[in-house]
Amino acid sequence: MNKTGIVIILLCFLAAAAVVLWERRKARKTMEEIERMLDAAMTGSFSETNFDESQLSALETKFAHYLSAAEASSQNIAQEKDKIKTLIADISHQTKTPIANLLLYSELLMEETLPASAKANVEALYKQSEKLRFLIDSLVKLSRLENGIISLFPQQAALQPLLESVVEQYAAKASEKGLSLQMQDTDAFAVFDFKWTAEALANIVDNAIKYTEHGTITISAVSYEMFARIDISDTGLGIPETEQAKIFARFYRSNSVQKQEGVGIGLYLARQIISGEGGYIKVASVPGKGSTFSIFLPK
């Protein structure tokens, strides 16, 4: 092979190497630009204001259009959440005063000297007003939780103060019904939001008192390596196995407890709270012998 052929082959090789390097550099720039877009999207600062399509590859162009659409969708969702937040606040505000007035006037009427039939009607009116207040408050809490308006802030803490606060809240109600509300001391700890977890436990304890006619309600906690378990056990009606998966549904009430006061929202709210903290609830029950609700919280 003469020198000219060698030179041509060498030039072709150099040209090919140059093309490969150029394409590789172009691909690297494209990936860097996509990475920049992703970083901007994750921080919520993505914008196409200075978008120069002539300098981007087809992939970058499509990706930029996708991120722009996603950003617009995110803004729409945020606006809808603001509307829902305003609506919930309006409902809460507009219903609070009328319900408070119903309760107040009912109490005033009960202090009057009334015929037996009228007194029974006033007492029924008071109870229904209380039920309405509880329902509105629960629905507002649920809506705020489900729409992300209320945020849970789980922190690692001891379970003893949490359990003590629930026992203190319901000791009198249990005693009025002739029930014993007991708590076993514990040194267990977990990661939870104190206020909202107390509300979840309170809903379960309230149900236990409501559906237990005699015996004991016990609250205890067990610590494991990765999680802690809170048990709330009663000696009440119990729950048939066919209904145990249904009791956490919104507004579900068993036919066997229709005569009892309630709206079927307490367990649903409890599950929403515990799930939001990374935990879960399960139930074990034998009809006629009682139930145990177990709340699992991460450590």
Image: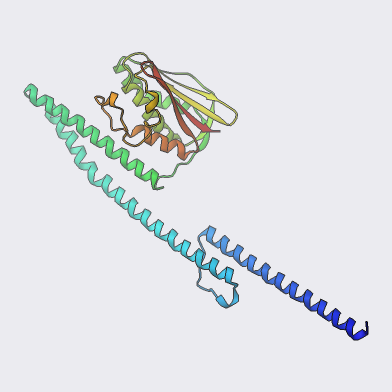
Q: Residue furthest bottom?
A: 4
Is residue 124 found left or right of 11 in the rendered image? left
Q: Is residue 109 left or right of 160 when viewed as pictured?
A: left
What residue sits 16% from the left and 27% below the top? 123
Q: Quadrant of residue 204?
A: top left
- x and y percentages locating residue 218 in the rendered image: 42, 19
Q: What colouring style does the render use?
A: rainbow
User: Residue sitting at 30 percent across and 48 percent down?
Assistant: 89
Residue that lies at the very extreme toward the left in this rendered image? 115
Number of marks in the rendered image: 0
Please state, as top left, top right, bottom left or bottom right, where the N terminus lies in the image: bottom right
Q: Position of residue 172 (x, y in %)?
A: 32, 20
| Picture quarter with the C terminus | top right
Residue 82: name its quadrant: bottom left
Q: Residue at x 29, y 17 (%)?
A: 177
Residue furthest to the front in view is 1
Residue 177 lies, with reference to residue 95, above or below; the image says above
Q: Is residue 9 left or right of residue 180?
A: right
In this rendering, the answer to whether 254 lies above or below 155 is above
Query: Relative to the observer, which residue lies in front, 238 or 42?
Result: 238
- Residue 131 position, x and y percent, is 24, 33
Q: In x, y percent, where is residue 290? A: 39, 18
| Image side of residue 63 versus residue 106, left or right | right
At x 14%, y 30%, the residue is 108
Camera-side residue of 248 and 92 = 248
